[in-house]
Structures are given as structure tokens and as C-alpha cells.
Image (spheres, helix red, strand yellow):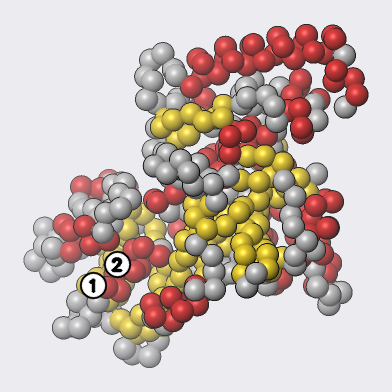
């Protein structure tokens, strides 16, 4: 922008930068409690208006000011913008400079891989979640880290809407979608490169790409010698008193809900698995059970006991425990079980929805056989290992009968990748 260099505007930018720095110091370290970011500071309000969702006017001055909106991308990138990272309980953890992690980028000229129908389905379901549940789930109204680049929740909704329109048009015309063409993406979207930020490994620059899956497991509707480990559902009329938050996974497995246990009758046993089957169900979030009576059903995590997942601790030692419900599909993010997003393998990432944000479209790039390989997906799921986590995504790889087939499949997928956010221009 040619008038950016005028003396008058330069002076204005200098004053704005000074005010921003002064504001940010007080914003990141509240005087009453330096360890806790108050809700009004960390969360943007979202008002629902059919069929659109609009941001409320209250915005943080350090992230979105009229002066910053007038600058070009290259000059706004030079302005330091801070962001307070929070954990799943909304506790302040640390502050980072958004420009340290995010920068303008461009996709290489390789075809982007994804299944068109599966991506369309996941995008539509994610967009519908914003439309239907913004009032009940204010967490999805947070701009998150991308707010430091002037990206609003409205921008993300426009991105989803545009991609849905393009996919529908291309599928209806029986042609490969334009969203697989890097030139089309670079022309129509802001491409924002995401450099990993890992406090434990400062040298990590690429995102770690872990993989998860839905596993089919044999199980029984009644307890047997082989299938002796239950998964439970909370009874709606008893869940409100939060009695289940008193008990660790080890407490539950000791038999407190079984006949003779001190809390017998307060939960409903849904199925019985092997212990290994339970641990995989807890880790993956969704399980497909093939029952001994010939029936089968999906079950998804519903509510947990309020104990944090401990990164690095082996699964059997984790104290977090999840209660399940029967569902009709693979489910991703949602503030309650009945509202969770139906997701598809191959196009879904689980990530940090509080600090990165729900509905962000991501392209990952890695080398495969000496060629650049691009894959697109949407952040439509989350988990305890991602709150907070600015250096990792979990890729939903598929449905598998066992761990061996899963491991064989994911060998073709990268352990680390360069990542880009796509935001409609």
C-alpha cells in the first residue's frame, strides 16, 4: 500500500504500536491472578444470526485494530502481536508472539490429496456446528492464534462456505475439484505457514503428525471371562450431581459400578471389552464393537471425570476416565455428545481447538518418493493431548480391525510435515 509510508501514517502506527505494547503487558498478566486469564479476556463473544454467525464488537486491541486492518500482509507481519496460550481449564500457560509461529506462505505446485465426498461431508458438518451451537459453546468463538494475523471467526466461516460451494459445484459436474489445484488455492486463499512451537523442543519447526483410528473390537453385552472390562454410560437423571468426578479410571475398574460396588446402579454398562480394547477406546475416542450376538455399533466418549490427561504417562496409569454413549457415526468435536460433529477419515485432524480453533482448514506437505505430497483436512476433533499444543496434529487414518493393519497403513504417512492454514481472501 503506497500511502503506508507517508509521514502521517508512520507516526500513527508508532503511537498504535506503543499503545498495543502497553495494553498487551496488562492483558497477559492480570493483576489479581497472574496464572489465570479471565474469561472476558481470553474469549471472544459470538452472536448467532441465521444463517450467519457474527463476531461481537468486543475485540482485543492488540489483535485487531483499524490501523492494522489497513496495512498490507507484509507490513502487518512486522508488527509484534502477542497471544496468551491457555489450557483446557482456561488457565493461562504462557504468551507467544504470533509472528514467531505464523507467516505468509505459498503452496508448492503439487496436487492436493483428499477424497472429495468425505471432505465435503466433514466441512458441511463442521460448518453446521458453528451455526447450531455457537450460543451453547462459546469456545468456538475464540479467534485463537490466527487472530494475531487478522483472521477472525467470520473469515473461517467464509472459508468453509466457499469450499463447500466449490466442492458441491465440482462434484455435481463430475470433475476433479478445483480445491486440489495449488494455483487455485494460492489465488483464492491466504496461505499461512504454521511453524511448530514446542517449549520442550525449541528446535522443532515442522508439525508432528500423529495418527488415530477407529478400531473394530469384539465385545459382549454381558460380562464374560474374556470380555470383563466395561464401558459405561452416565444416566441422564444422575449425571448432574457430578458424582463421577470423584473417581479415577482405576477406581472405576475396581468395580465400584458393578453389582456389590458402592456406586452400583448409577451408570449403565454399554458393553464389555478386553482391557486392551478399553484402553484403545479411551485413547481413540470412538470404537466400533462387533458383539458376540452378531450385532455391531459405534460408541463415542461423552463426559470425563475432570482429570487431565498426562502427556508421557502410559495409558494404563492415566487417571482420566471417559464415559461413553452409542452414536451413529465417527464423532469429532462437540460440547456434548448429542452435538458432536460427524467426521470422516482421511480429511480430519484433531488439534488444539482452544488456541488453534475449530474449523481451520490445513494442508500438510511432506516428501514422499522424492516428490512433494500435499494433503488437506479440517480441524474437527480434539483431545486432552492437544490442550494446549501448538506443535502437533492427529490425523484420522481410518477404521481398522487391529493395530497391525493400522501400523501398516500409516507407514505411508509422515511423522513430521510442513503445515499451512487456508483462509479465504
Q: Is residue 38 above or below residue 215?
A: above
Q: Quadrant of the C terminus?
A: top right
Q: Residue furthest left?
A: 260
What residue is pinned by disc 2?
279
Q: Is residue 207 above or below residue 346?
A: above
Residue beneath the point at 76% across and 27% down: 75
> Residue 388: image x %, image y %?
44, 42
Q: Is residue 423 visible?
A: no
Disc 1 from disc 2: Cα separation: 6 Å
Residue beneath the point at 44% across and 77% down: 406
Residue beneath the point at 68% across and 34% down: 149
Q: Residue furthest right?
A: 2
Q: Is residue 106 visible?
A: yes
Q: Quadrant of the N terminus?
A: top right
**Image side of residue 317 versus residue 8, left or right:** left
**Image side of residue 413 versus residue 52, left or right:** left
The answer to the question of whether label 1 and label 2 lie on touching residues, with beta carbons closer than 8 A, is: yes
> Residue 235: image x %, image y %?
31, 59
Residue beneath the point at 49% across and 47% down: 204
Q: Is residue 55 above or below residue 383?
A: above
Find numbered disc 1 in the image and state the secondary structure of the residue it sits on.
helix
Q: Residue furthest front?
A: 370
**Image side of residue 201 versus residue 320, left or right:** right
What residue is pinned by disc 1?
275
Find numbered disc 2 in the image and state the secondary structure of the residue it sits on.
helix
**Image side of residue 107 versus residue 34, left or right:** right
Amino acid at each position: 500500500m503506497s500511502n503506508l509510508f507517508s509521514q502521517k501514517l508512520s507516526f500513527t502506527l508508532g503511537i498504535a504500536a506503543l499503545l498495543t505494547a502497553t495494553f498487551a503487558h496488562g492483558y497477559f498478566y492480570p493483576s489479581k491472578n497472574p496464572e489465570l486469564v479471565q474469561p472476558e479476556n481470553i474469549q471472544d463473544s459470538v452472536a448467532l444470526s441465521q444463517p450467519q454467525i457474527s463476531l461481537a464488537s468486543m475485540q482485543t486491541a492488540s489483535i485487531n485494530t483499524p490501523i492494522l486492518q489497513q496495512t498490507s500482509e507484509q507490513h502487518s507481519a512486522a508488527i509484534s502481536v502477542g497471544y496468551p496460550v491457555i489450557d483446557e481449564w482456561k488457565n493461562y500457560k504462557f504468551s507467544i508472539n504470533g509472528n514467531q509461529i505464523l507467516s505468509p506462505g505459498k503452496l508448492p505446485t503439487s496436487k492436493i490429496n483428499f477424497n472429495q465426498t468425505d471432505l465435503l461431508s466433514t466441512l458441511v458438518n463442521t460448518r453446521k456446528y458453528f451455526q447450531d451451537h455457537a450460543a451453547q459453546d462459546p469456545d468456538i468463538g475464540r479467534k485463537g492464534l490466527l487472530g494475531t494475523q487478522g483472521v477472525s471467526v467470520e473469515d473461517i466461516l467464509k472459508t468453509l462456505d466457499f469450499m463447500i460451494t466449490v466442492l458441491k459445484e465440482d462434484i455435481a459436474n463430475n470433475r476433479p475439484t478445483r480445491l486440489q489445484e495449488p494455483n487455485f488455492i494460492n489465488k483464492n486463499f491466504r496461505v499461512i505457514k504454521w511453524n511448530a512451537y514446542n517449549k520442550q523442543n525449541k528446535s522443532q519447526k515442522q508439525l508432528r503428525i500423529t495418527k488415530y483410528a477407529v478400531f473394530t473390537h469384539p465385545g459382549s453385552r454381558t460380562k464374560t471371562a474374556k470380555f470383563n472390562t466395561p464401558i459405561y454410560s452416565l444416566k441422564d437423571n444422575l449425571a448432574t450431581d457430578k458424582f463421577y468426578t470423584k473417581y479415577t479410571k482405576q477406581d472405576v475398574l475396581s468395580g465400584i459400578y458393578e453389582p456389590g460396588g458402592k456406586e452400583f446402579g448409577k451408570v449403565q454398562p454399554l458393553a464389555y471389552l478386553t482391557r486392551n480394547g478399553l484402553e484403545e477406546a479411551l485413547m481413540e475416542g470412538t470404537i466400533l464393537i462387533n458383539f458376540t450376538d452378531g450385532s455391531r455399533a459405534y460408541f463415542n466418549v461423552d463426559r470425563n471425570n475432570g482429570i487431565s490427561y498426562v502427556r508421557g504417562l502410559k495409558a494404563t496409569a492415566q487417571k482420566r476416565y471417559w464415559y461413553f454413549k452409542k452414536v451413529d457415526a465417527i464423532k469429532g468435536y462437540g460440547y456434548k455428545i448429542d452435538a458432536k460433529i460427524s467426521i470422516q477419515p482421511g480429511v480430519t485432524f484433531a488439534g488444539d481447538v482452544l488456541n488453534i480453533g475449530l474449523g481451520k482448514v490445513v494442508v500438510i506437505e511432506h516428501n514422499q518418493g522424492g516428490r512433494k505430497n500435499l494433503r488437506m483436512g479440517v480441524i474437527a476433533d480434539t483431545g486432552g493431548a492437544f490442550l494446549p499444543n501448538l506443535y502437533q496434529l492427529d490425523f484420522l487414518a481410518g477404521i481398522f480391525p487391529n493395530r497391525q493393519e493400522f501400523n501398516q497403513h500409516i507407514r505411508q504417512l509422515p511423522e513430521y510435515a510442513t503445515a499451512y492454514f487456508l483462509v479465504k481472501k
